Amino acid sequence: MFVRLLLILFVLWYTSIASAKDLIRLPNVMGSSDPLAYQFELTAIRAALEATVADFGEYEVSHHPRFMPRARLLKELASGNLINVAPAPTRTEWENQVTPIYFPLRKGTLGFRIFLVHKNSKALFSKIDSIASLKKLSAGQDYSWSSGIRMRSLGFQIYSDTSVKRFYDMLNHARYDYYPKAIYEARRDAKKIALSHPNIIVEETKMLLLFQPLYIFVSPHEERLTKRMRTGIWRIHHNGIFDKIFANFHDVKQMKRDVDKRQIFTTISPQDLFKHPAFADPNLWFYGWPGSTDPHL
């Protein structure tokens, strides 16, 4: 009887383990300025999870029903109750309060900033020959954005507004000088607003390089999930799947052309680059990042 009871308990325990799933609770991005751009991050996260099924078992992904501002998102991620995984541009408080997976999802290109400008400002930008002269112009950035925080800390003049649409409206009327956009989004966004904001064009000669890697962050209460995400993202990097995903979501040839033809003003310092050994691996970063190689895509 006792042996039979033990056997039943073992079967129940084994069944529960076999049927257990890792529950990944992601943020809702539908209230963000560009929810479609999030599909790249989601695809990479799912690929990393799929690559670790043999090691960690099945998984289930859900999204919180409501959009959260960055401050609220950090709070919820730290608790792990509503959100336990979130891709986000790094900030000091994020690295201190939740667990970063030190792998740059966008290959550093979130910090490759080319400019949307008013069509009459070509002559103005032809005279910009240094970071010091660029800092004299006003850049459209929300004070709460990671890029805005970074640029303000570096001494750039910031024009802030209440929404992305307002940034476009004001630039269309030349109320500020330039709107720095990630190299993978600037041309797409300019095309998208061409009819509604006909005075906005892509500036073709300058680029600002910010230290703005985008990581996967995991709740500090999720050690197993942290291990799974770290294992998975590095696995799809080494087997080439990550590069294929990156190429599917980015116009790599156009991005490289945009790097090659521009005068680059870099704000990245040696202090930024020593934080983690990943920064020494040129294959993780896009062409144009300090020390990087041509994209092997």
Image (cartoon, helix red, strand yellow):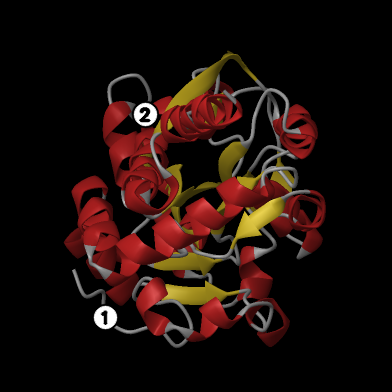
Compared to 125, does 14 lie above or below?
Answer: above
Task: State the mark number for residue 294.
Answer: 1
Local secondary structure at mark 2:
helix
Compared to 205, does 271 lie above or below?
Answer: below
User: As rendered, which of 6 and 137 lies closer to the eye?
Assistant: 6
Residue 79 at what x, y percent from top left?
Answer: 79, 33
Q: Is residue 242 left or right of residue 27?
A: left
The C terminus, quarter of image: bottom left
User: As rendered, which of 117 and 41 lies closer to the eye?
Assistant: 41
Report the amino acid beneath label 1.
Answer: Asp
Q: In this view, does 137 lie to the left or right of 123?
A: right
Please report whichever mark, 1 or 2, sits nearer to the chain's N-terminal start.
2
Binning the other alpha carbons within 10 Å of mark 1 as few (below 14), some (14 to 19) or many (20 upward) gives few
Residue 273 at what x, y percent from top left?
Answer: 63, 80
| Number of numbered discs visible in the structure rendering | 2
Compared to 191, does 28 lie above or below?
Answer: above
The N terminus, quarter of image: top right
Residue to which mark 2 is pinned: 36
Residue 36 placement: quadrant: top left
Binning the other alpha carbons within 10 Å of mark 2 as few (below 14), some (14 to 19) or many (20 upward) gives few
User: As rendered, which of 275 and 178 lies closer to the eye?
Assistant: 275
User: As rendered, which of 270 and 38 lies closer to the eye?
Assistant: 38
Q: How far apart are marks 1 and 2 (CA)?
A: 27 Å
Q: Residue at x 33, y 51 (%)?
A: 54
Residue 25 placement: quadrant: top right
Report the amino acid beneath label 2.
Answer: Leu
Local secondary structure at mark 1:
loop
Residue 183 at what x, y percent from top left?
Answer: 38, 55
Residue 147 at what x, y percent from top left?
Answer: 64, 51
Q: Is residue 261 visible?
A: no
Q: Is residue 24 left or right of residue 96?
A: left
